[in-house]
Amino acid sequence: MSRYRNLALFLTLSVIWGTAYLAIDAGLTTLPPVLFAALRYDVAGAALFAFAVARSDRWRPRTFAEWRLVAVGGLLVIGLNFAFLFSGQRYVGGSIAAIVASTAPVLTPLFARFLLPGEQLDARGAVGVLLGLAGVVVVATGGSTLGGDLVGIVLLALAAVSFALGTVLTERYDAPLSLVPTQAWMMLVGAAFLHAVSGLLGETPPLALSWTPTAFAALAYLALVSSAVGYVLYFDLLDRLGAVEISLVKYVVPVVTALVGWAALGQSLSAGTVAGFALIVGGFALLKGGDAFDEMVRLQARVGRGYDAENVYVPDSSARRNTAFGDD
């Protein structure tokens, strides 16, 4: 395939994942946040589970190590991550949510430094992490015409922390169960956790909700297009581009979210929010230029399992190509 096909797929993936945040905005107008997240992963997990049963020789975890991996990923990467993310988006728009979520790759080496034996974070990497965190502070205090609220920023930051911590812990507790069954079980465990949290919070149960066409459309888009189609595109591009290039999609997504939100919904971003995003990208650039980025890519190549449309890292893959969007 030509580099133009790869570029087209990369942009398609960026649009799918960038508009996912706007679909969350749309669904939250009528659906409780944690229940909304739970229903998303009910549908996405069931679809992927059916695919795993049909296509995988072994689709069920058998050992303690495999169940531990599923539990850690399901509770942190899916459960807590999306409980915080969907709840945070009740206070701020999708564009800001996408920006704050983009700090997750910057936080990963920081957790790895303390939780994984032998992991190091050099001075340049440490500055990159601090820049990323400073970017979140600027977003939180810079003011936004999207109705930004400090509570929302804090919840979204906790989502990024949950995802980064879950990523590192799945490295620590890695197990041999193959990719698709692992992902399916994590989604289902995460959905069960989200349903439990929704019940504890006293959210309206699904059958008592007033289901609008917008709510149905948002749920279907997130579960089937963002999670299912995005998942397929991601792994196709991973094989073609490699770990480094595909990780850059994380920083295209907030731009897509902001542009689509502005064009379709009349949303806008303050100068402070844009400056905060620039700091986050700058922090990532420092990590990319130092030894810490090499460690981050290695971690992502070993532990990321395509967890979701908004927060996807690199699964097991040795593909690392030198030219983005180059020919096969």
Image: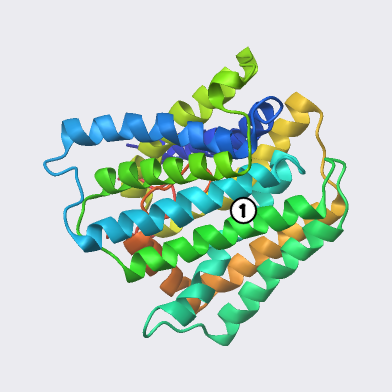
Residue 291 vs residue 174, the one in the foreground: 174
Figure colour scheme: rainbow
Closer to the camera in the image, 202 or 99 = 202
> 20 above or below 249?
above
Q: Secondary structure at mark 1?
A: helix
Residue 208 rendering spot, x and y as whole percentages: 60, 20
Query: Dot 1, how many residues are within 10 Å of its Cα: few (below 14), some (14-19), or many (20+)?
Result: many
Percent position (x, y) of residue 6? 41, 39
- State the residue at coordinates (81%, 28%): 266
What residue is rendered at 40% in x and 51% in y?
Answer: 74
Single out the residue that lies furthest toward the left.
57
Q: Position of residue 243 (x, y in %)?
A: 39, 57
Q: Amino acid at mark 1?
A: Ala
- Residue at 31% across, 67% down: 173
Q: For residue 133, what is the image quadrant?
A: bottom right
Query: For residue 107, what is the image quadrant?
Result: bottom right
In this image, 224 relative to 24: left or right? left
Using the image, determine if residue 66 lies above or below residue 233: below
Quarter occupied by the C terminus: top left
One can see residue 317 in this view: no
Quadrant housing residue 253: top right
| Residue 222 in sight in this render | yes
Q: Is residue 10 left or right of residue 128?
A: left
Q: Is residue 78 above or below residue 214?
A: below
Give the position of the N terminus as an image quadrant.
top left
Residue 272 x, y percent position in the rendering: 85, 56
Mark 1 = which residue?
Answer: 101
Query: Residue visible at 52% across and 31% down?
Result: 222
In-image side of 97 versus 291 (left or right): right
